[in-house]
Amino acid sequence: MISAPSHRQPLNGNKYFSAFQWMCALLFGVLLFSSCELFKPISQGGGTNPKDDKEELDPIQGRRVYDPATGTFVVVQNAPTDPMDTIRWRDIPSSLEPPIYSTSAPVAQNPGGTNPVTPIGIGEGNSQLLSSYNVAVVLPFLSDRYNSVDGRIASNSIWALQFYNGMEMAFDELDQAGISLNVNVIDTKANPREVSSLARFNRDLNSAHMIIGPYLRDNASVLAEKARLTGAVLVSPQSASSSISARNPNYVQVKPTLATHCKAIMQHALQDHTREQIVLVGMDTEAEAARFDYFQKEYERLNGLEDTEPLKRLLIDTTQLDMQEVDLKPWFSFDRETVFIVPSWSQESFIYNFLRKLDLDRQQYQMVRVYGMPQWMDYERIDFDYYEKLNVHVSSSSFIDDLNPDIRAFKRRYYDRYGEIPSDQAFLGYDVTNYFCRMINTYGTKFQYRLQENVDELLHTDFQFQPVIIPTTTGVEFPQVERWENQFVNILKFQNYRFTKAE
């Protein structure tokens, strides 16, 4: 069965606080009874190999979160992830890894009880089928920032608490289905140095068959290398980077990469438009100009290299981002819709100025469609009248349809249990846990090789995993898997002042 505290108190009142109290009490109890040595000091060790800088689509992270103390939504300035416009890849230097302490605490079915893991067979591809599977949940609970004086938790830990709330609901369903799991919860403290040390010495990570988490890209890179060495499968629910770990078939990425978002936008645009109608728009920088190649390559792939004419491109000089001196009139057509694809997100002011100018320069009967990036949904200063008038579409790794009966049922169950409305992260935690725990239970320790044939429509998105293959030089060698990536991207349309699923 799934491990769960047998003596946990019901969650009531402030549910973030209650969940966090439970976690802190559990950590304190393990500290008192340290026979399992979870808080044993560890020593300094080596680091990771450096990687080249590479541009990525950052996690889709809203900055407005619910504050249970005031009952309002607040803007989090220091969320436990890199800012959305940070696109540089960084590794952890080995010199920044002083001795720290493990923060792992097992969630046991019974105090001192066991849930033994025994082999029960061998599946396809030498996948081990076991009586129970060890699952390590590695999230930034930020227990070190808990204020014991007033009982307040760090606002940046809300993501992890909501995600874990969704996981708990999934664990209950898995338990009822007779799926046996040993779950261990580990606090990363959103600290790459902490995670580096845990990866080297933590017993729960060493024995895990599957790891779910963490949040930061740097931490995901560390644990991906750990999974490569131990043979565990790392399920990364948040990072959208394509450079987490090279040549690592044990790394599974839930969020699509920037390249996958661009391909999905191009596929959707070409359903009803031709190459002549499409204009790529961005700031005249090396990074933004390079993004155009994703669209061009996907266009050529879809056309079978029969038409390799370049797509039209409009690069705005960085000295003219106010768009006052830019004339957009020549880019419009009178007899058909013009499609502007804008793979830019780092400067909200540029997007606002472009949309405003687009609306000013077009004539009354000139039709337009604009494709943007998922970060556009989190902008706070743009007048959403422009989204409505300019037929704005965006790509997104998730979409919560409030009209879906299954979504409504989940919200009711979540509210009955925790006393609040679930965030997108609660849906993510529920879906990831349900899907991957059922996969490992069915196919064993190497379940990732069966992901491709297990397409599933979940609450927050669809899962359509594909192997990212390392190209071979001769085309004869057996292709090697770089990683597994969910390549389903939602295309959303802004209509009636809300984002809905585009056709």
Image (cartoon, rainbow, N blue to C red):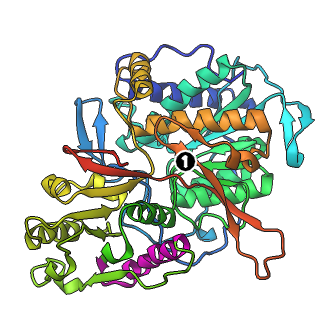
At x 25%, y 50%, the residue is: 494
| Pick the front one: 150 or 384 | 384
Compared with residue 363, is residue 418 higher up or lower down, i.e. above or below? above
| Pick the front one: 13 or 465 | 465
Residue position for label 1: 237
Q: Position of residue 230 (x, y in %)?
A: 79, 52
Task: State yes or no: residue 469 in magenta.
Answer: no
Q: Position of residue 182 (x, y in %)?
A: 72, 30
Question: Element under label 1?
Answer: loop
Q: Is residue 41 visible?
A: no
Give, as a three-letter code, the residue at label 1: Pro
Q: Position of residue 110 (x, y in %)?
A: 70, 17
| Pick the front one: 361 or 411 | 361
From the viewer's perspective, is 362 left or right of 344? left
Range shown magenta = 282-302
Check the image and name the residue furthest to the front: 335
Q: Quadrant of residue 432?
A: top right
Q: Position of residue 500 (x, y in %)?
A: 32, 44
At x 61%, y 61%, the residue is: 221
Compared with residue 135, is residue 329 higher up or lower down, i.e. above or below? below
At x 67%, y 57%, the residue is: 224
Compared with residue 49, is residue 218 higher up or lower down, i.e. above or below? above
Q: How many marks?
A: 1
